[in-house]
Amino acid sequence: MQNVRGRIIAFLSLVLVLTIPFLFTKCSGYKIQKESRGVSSGRCSVCGTINTGGQSFCSFCGVAFSNAYREYKTPIITTNDQKKIFEIAKTNENREVREAAVKKLVDPALLADFARNDKVRYVRMAAVENPHLTDQALLADFAMNDEENSIRETAVDKLTDQVLLAAVAQNTEKNRGRENVRARAVRRLADQGLLAQIAKKDESNYVRRTAVEKLTDQALLTDFAKNDEDSYVREEAIKNLYNAVKELTDQNLLAQIAKNSEFGVVRLAAVEKLTDQALLAHIAKNDLDGYVCKEAIRRLVDPALLADIAKNFKGFNVRLGAVENPNFTNQTLIAEIAWNDNDMAVREAAVRKLIDQAQLADFAKGFRDGSMRLAAISNPHFTDQALLAYFAKNDEDRQVREAALRKLTDQAVLFDIAKNDESGEVRRTAVEGLTSPALLAEIAEIAKSNKDWEVWRVAERKLQNLKKK
C-alpha cells in the first residue's frame, strides 16, 4: 500500500514539475524566444589560434571575428487579452517586453498615455509607431515637443493633416536646432504657395533646400537656381528643373527649354528628348556646353546635316561627334575627312569608319603618324593577309606591328616574327597567334636557348593547352 502511495506521489510530483513552467508561461502572456547565430569556436584566419567560447575577438592577436557567436532574445506577446497586455506594458521590468506589449495595444487612449508619459524612450517610440495611434493633433504635439528627435520624426511621418504639417514645418521656436524634423514636415506638404514661402524665407538653408525640392513652378525654380545665396539651394533647384524636363513630351516646350534655359544640365535634359533635326543641328553648332552639343549630335539621324557638320564646323569635338555618329556613312566624305581634317582624333575616327580595303591600305601606307596607321590596321575591314604581313614585319611602330599580328593567320610569318623581331612584346604577340604544335615547340626551344623567358612561357602555355584538347 505504501509503495502504491509513493508511486502516486512521485507521479503527481512529476506532473507538477512538467506543467508548472508551462502554466507560468501561459499566464505571463509573453515568452522570450532565443536565437543563436554565428559559430562558438573556430580558427583565427590571421594568426591561426583556435578560439572557443564564442568570443568576438581572437584571444591571441585581437582581430575581430565577422561571424562570432551571438545569442538573441526576442520577447513575443502570446496573449490577445488587452488588459493583460496593458499590465505587461505597465509593470514588466524588462524594457524590451514592455516595448513589445505596447506594440500590441489597440486602445488609442492607452497608447497616448504611454507616448506622453513613459520614461523610457523606446516604449514611447513603440506607442507613437503603433498604427492605432492616429490622433493628428496629438501626433503634431509629439512632433513639436517630445524630447527625442527620433520620436518627433516618427510623429511627423504619421501626420497627414496639411495644416498641422505646416505648423510643424514653420515652428522654428519649438523645433529650433531640429531642422531635420521641420524638413521632414516640408516633404509632406502639398501647398505650392506655402512651399515657395518656406523656400524663400526659412532661416535654415536645409529646410529651404527641402522646400525647393518639392516645388514644381518653373519660374520659381529658375529664380532660385539663378539667384539664391546658398549653393545647395541653387543646385537643388537645377536638379528639380532637370527632373521636370525629363518628364516632358511636348516638343515645342522642349525646344524652348533647349534653346533658352540658362543651365546646361537642363538644356541637356531637353535635348535628350528632342526629335527636330534642324534644331538639333543648330544646338550642336551653337550651344556653349560641350555635353549638350555632343548629345545633340548623337541624336541626329539626317546624313546631310551630319555631313555638313563633319566637314565644315570649326569645333573639332563637334566634328568628331558627327563623324562617329552611326548615321554618317558617306564613304567618299569620310575618306576626305581622314586625309584632310586638321585634328588627329577626327581623322582617326574617320579611318575607323572606312570599309574599302584599298583605301585602308592607302591610309596605312600613306600616314607618317603611327596612330593613324594603327587606326587603319585595326579597322575590322582591313583583312588583306599580305599587307598585314608587310606591316607586321616592317612597320617602325611596335603597336602597329602588334595590331597586324593579331589579324595574321600565316603560320610561317608568325614564326619568323616570333623568332626575329627586336621587340619582346611583338615576339610574344606573334607566339600567341601560332597554332602549329611543331612551330610552338621549336620557338619554345629557341626562346629557351636565348633565355627569352617571356616568349618561352607563352609558347609552353600554348603547347600545354593544345595537348589538353
Image (tube, helix red, strand yellow):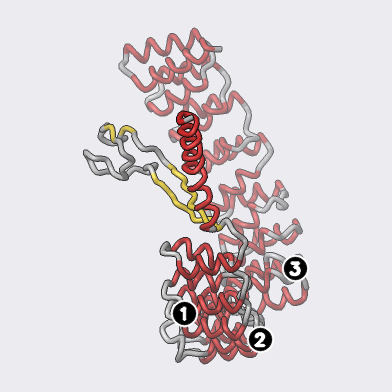
- For label 2, the SS is loop
Res 368 visible: no
Q: Name which residue type carries label 3.
A: Ala
- What residue is pinned by disc 2? 191
For mark 3, does the 10 Å Cα neighbourhood hold few (<14), some (14 to 19), or many (20 or more) residues?
A: few
Q: Name which residue type carries label 2.
A: Asp
Q: Nearer the viewer, residue 429 or 157?
A: 157
- What residue is pinned by disc 3? 278
Residue 379 sits above or below residue 83 on the image: above
Closer to the chain start, of discs 3 and 2, is 2
Q: Nearer the viewer, residue 342 or 153?
A: 153
What separation in Å lies between label 1 and label 2 (alpha carbons)? 34 Å
- For label 1, the SS is helix
What separation in Å lies between label 3 and label 2 (alpha carbons)? 41 Å
User: How many numbered tags mark residues here?
Assistant: 3
Nearest to the eye among marks 3 and 2: give it: 2
- For label 3, the SS is helix
For image coordinates 70% across by 46% down, the residue present is 331
Q: Quadrant of the C terminus?
A: top right
